Amino acid sequence: MTKQEDRVALVTGGARRIGASIVQFLHQAGFKVAIHCHQSSTEAANLAKLLNNLQANSAEVIQCDLQRSDAGASIINDVTRWAGRLDLLVNNASVFFRTDTQQWQVDDQNRLFQINVFAPFALSTAAFPWLQLQKGSIVNITDIHADNPLKGYALYCQSKAALAMQTKALAREFAPLVRVNAVAPGAIAWPEHENSLSLSAREQIIARTPLKSHGQPEYIAQAVLALANNAFITGQILKVDGGRSLT
């Protein structure tokens, strides 16, 4: 079996928030990590510096706009040129914003589906030839709202539902050499900027969550590593939401 410290992971959107937590957790577990970013290059560079100070040449920044038509192939080429192999792809990068069903824009639809659906597909298919060499795996980060729509976010919810189906479809396509699973977070990292929630809205979400708490990003990272390590799980979507999807 491949030693964990020999393995290489690529985490898209790995510079901040949940992505950064996944990067740090995988690194702590012994992975070399490729940190993909687009606009968060400063945060990505700082994170890579921190990790490389702990272990030389164990982290690399890969900067690319996922809306580029060649993004998938370009990113995988950069990662494998750096590390020479790939064992785990974590499709974490995502966009999240409100859309009005009566005034929605085609540009909004295209951006949501390009980054949340088409880019993960391009990355997964480009990564497959490398992943199969190691019997590696893919973990997509979906959302509990792929099943239970969030009012005001119809296009976003559709994109995450498509990613959930992509997870199952590619699990069939890539078996038996590469496993494909997903983690569906609940209330983990509160939305930022124009999507930010008031204190009362946050309290209402926590009140509706059976475990009565707000999740931490490391819970998602733990789930990603568990799916990466279990060789007999594929095509599954693990909800990490404190039981919120039960209500």
Image (cartoon, helix red, strand yellow):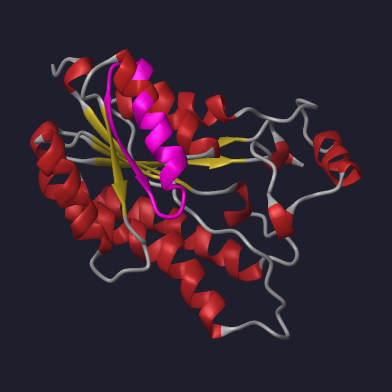
Q: Quadrant of the N terminus?
A: top left
Residue 122 rendering spot, x and y as whole percentages: 27, 61
Q: Quadrant of residue 69?
A: bottom left
142 sits to left or right of 209? left
Tell me which segment is drawn in magenta: 27-49
Question: Is residue 33 one of those drawn in magenta?
Answer: yes
- Identify the residue shown where x is 23% and y is 67%: 70
**x and y percentages locating residue 139 in the rendered image:** 37, 40
Residue 162 appears in view? yes
Q: In the image, is residue 231 above or below residue 106?
A: above
The part of the image, by quadrant, that contains residue 98 is bottom right
Q: Position of residue 97 (x, y in %)?
A: 64, 63
Q: Position of residue 38 (x, y in %)?
A: 40, 54
Quadrant for the C terminus in the image: top right
94 with respect to 27 (left or right): right
Look at 91% across and 43% down and name the residue there: 200
